[in-house]
Image (spheres, rainbow, N blue to C red):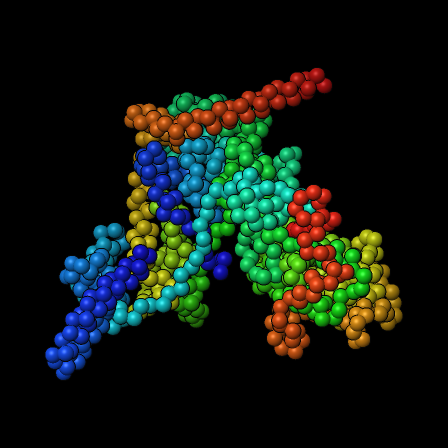
Amino acid sequence: MASKPKSRWADDEADAALEAQRKKEKEEKKRLKAEKARKLEAERKAREAAAASTSQQAGDDPDRGPPAKRRRLSPERDNHDGDDHGDDDHRDDDNEAPRAHAPSSETTAADPSNLLRFEGGTFGRSRSVENYDKLNDIEEGTYGWVSRAKDVATGQVVALKRLKMDPKDRSGVPVTGLREIQILKDCNHGNVVKLLEVVVGDDASKVDSIFLVLEFLEHDLKSILEDMPSPFLASEVKTLLRQLASGLAYLHDHFILHRDLKTSNLLLNNRGRLKIADFGMARYVSDPPPANLTPLVVTLWYRAPELLLGETRYGAAVDMWSVGCVFGELLTREPLLQGRNEVDQLARVFELCGTPSDDAWPGFRRLPHARGLKLPRGPPRRRSAPRSPSSPPPARPCSARSSPSTRPAAPPPARCSSTTTFARTRGPSPRPCSRPSRARPARSGGDGGRPPRRRRAARR
Amino acid sequence: MAHMTNPLATPDQLFQRRSLGALPMELQDIIFFSTQCLTQAAGLLLQLPQSVTAQANVLLARYWLVESMMAHEFSDVSAATLYLVAKLSSHPVSPRDVAYIYTYLLSSSSAFFHDPSSRPPPPPPPPFGSESTTTATASSFSSDKSNTPYLSPSGYQAFHARLLRLEGLVLAALGFDTHVALPHPLAVTYLQALDFFSFRRDGSKEAGRRALAARAVAYLNAALLSPQALYLTHQPPALAVAAMYSAARDVGAKMPECEWWEVFDVDREELGFLVVGMRSVEGWGRKMRKDMKEAMRGRERGMLTRKDVEGELRRRGLVAGDEVGNGSKMAVVDAAEEEAARRLDEKMAEMASAA
């Protein structure tokens, strides 16, 4: 590994020597032009040779620095294949051998191979939460408390999410919290909330409080929708949904199911950038999906029908259902399907999408909870799909299709973002920021005094 | 790319392992080797897939670059990492199962590190309640009196408390980064890419190809035990390629004539280093087993403990100040926990007798 810088060093030395040589040549030029040209040519050749057979020349020249990287070619190795039986001495011999043969390998050694370096970062101890000053509480969620805090050293404002640790829990650090940390650490996308670090309480002898340090975003979609006097414009819905789809496509491409998408988990900053947050339910899955997933995920109003029917082998389609629900909610400012319980929720789904038939959704009758299901006879009836008040064409979310197999995957809208469907690729619209009626003022409340009316960050 | 990359140790971390005040290197090596073997044995008995156990091995190696080896009992650290990795995997295990397995492995009746040359293998556990006579050599073993591994309720409470406390400490020491990418699947994929698994009608070379893959995986597993901590200094693709290279040599498989490792983004230098490292594990492991027997002073099986190492240090006249000091401070905490658990037991017993 160290050999790369070494050989570069050797090259630098060669270049420096060449520079000196060139200067001398310039003086000589006045005396003899023809000779200069010849000499330069020779020098250039010498340099090429130097760069090529690095190790040889490095050994001869005292100012050349450490010997450059040795290279070995397979022909030499093959000669030794027969007598090498695997102990270290043999290996060493083997390593020495090609040095003698190196001149023969000049051509390949000359062009540096273009290898991909894998960067995995490092590991080290978590810092203490004392590195952050708490500013105000934001909210308490199912899995933890969230507060706004400031990094003492840098002044950066962050959201601190404290993992709930139940001392009575006999299994230690909650696995959902660990999954959330691992998934967020692995993610790097503009529409997924960033985990800056994980800090712990000050007690060195045991770890009883764990804080996720997340980037701070001013709003979440749910509270914005609640406070808005008029719904989003079609273009605004479009940019929000495009960002959501692009974030979700990233997650699904990396085998992550979010499993709790809803408007309160979608954060929005003052510049209009949307980020997916709260990975408390998220997990890595395989493709095809594993068979033993729990269907008890996703907040009821955003839960896909296959989950309501007790499917344990589900995939990215459950997230897409939630996206459809969010879409509907963006248009009407009201959650699309507000069931009172699982049965009611399912009834509302069928009311909206029509009763599933064996053609539209093969095999849905075999799902665990489908057996006791009484479906209305006759042609499926549909409630009118939600419409955007500002845009006449009906906008029934195509992701809200009851059959998971015909529901579109997240990637298409995101990938065709440069084409017709989502032609507006200028990035998030700054508009909510410019109209106070739409969104809270950017810096309402300030840092001191009364806490701002409602600040949100990573959780709910 | 996450499935192909690991966080690696920094030069500082590696250097501190060898710096002044640390344990002598050969003792560190013995501790490392025996604890990693213990994790492997526990993983087998808990019926965890090797993918889980190997991740625990890697996490343990990382942890010991951040935290002193003597800070906690070795077997406890092993149990905590295994429990943690299993919890995050699709094969979670209960703390109770972990407790039973480790109690067995640490008991004198376990086959763990049994030396077949010195003694007949331990008899199968006798029926419950009967006394065995083969405990003479285990007299120094404090955790159990008889040959039957038995975990008392208070013992379990104490173990459980230690397990969860260490789980948190390991997580904090690693910055809550539990990501481990293993080279094993890469090795199989690479062998496929080199067309070693293509279906042949005659099946004549089938056995050889299988041997090649098995040998490569064996190299990767052996490298987990090496105190060179190859998994902490090299990325999975390099490990996979080195294992394939060594395996191909062993079984005499014909590899491409060109520099095929560059296809997998490994340069020759790195490959050479790893091949030497991996090939040396076997002989080194043999030596370790011998050394360990000496360190344990005649105890023929079971696991090296912190007490053994402290004794060894004292014998050499090297009571390394803060290492051991730190260790005994932790031991006090452990003792306090055990005491609390014992009191709880007595209380329970009282309540039971009262009822």
Where residue A95 sits, quadrant-wise, is: bottom left
Residue at figure coordinates x 58%, y 23% from the top left: B340
Is residue A301 visible from the viewing direction of this image? yes
Q: Could you say where residue B306 lies in the image, as x and y percent from the top left?
A: 41, 30
Residue at figure coordinates x 51%, y 42% from the top left: A127
Q: Is residue A215 above or below residue A353?
A: above
Q: Could you say where residue B162 lies in the image, as x and y percent from the top left?
A: 53, 32
Q: Is residue B311 left or right of residue A137?
A: left
- B296 or A233, nearer to the observer: A233
Residue at figure coordinates x 57%, y 61% from the top left: A189
Q: Is residue B281 left or right of residue A127?
A: left
- A377 or B174, nearer to the observer: B174
The furthest residue to the bottom: A34
Q: Is residue A185 above or below residue A425?
A: above
Residue at figure coordinates x 53%, y 23% from the top left: B336
Is residue B40 visible from the viewing direction of this image? no
Where residue A65 sits, quadrant-wise, is: bottom left
Q: Is residue B86 left or right of residue A227?
A: left
Q: Is residue A8 left or right of residue A179?
A: left
Q: Could you say where residue A27 lies in the image, as x and y percent from the top left?
A: 15, 74
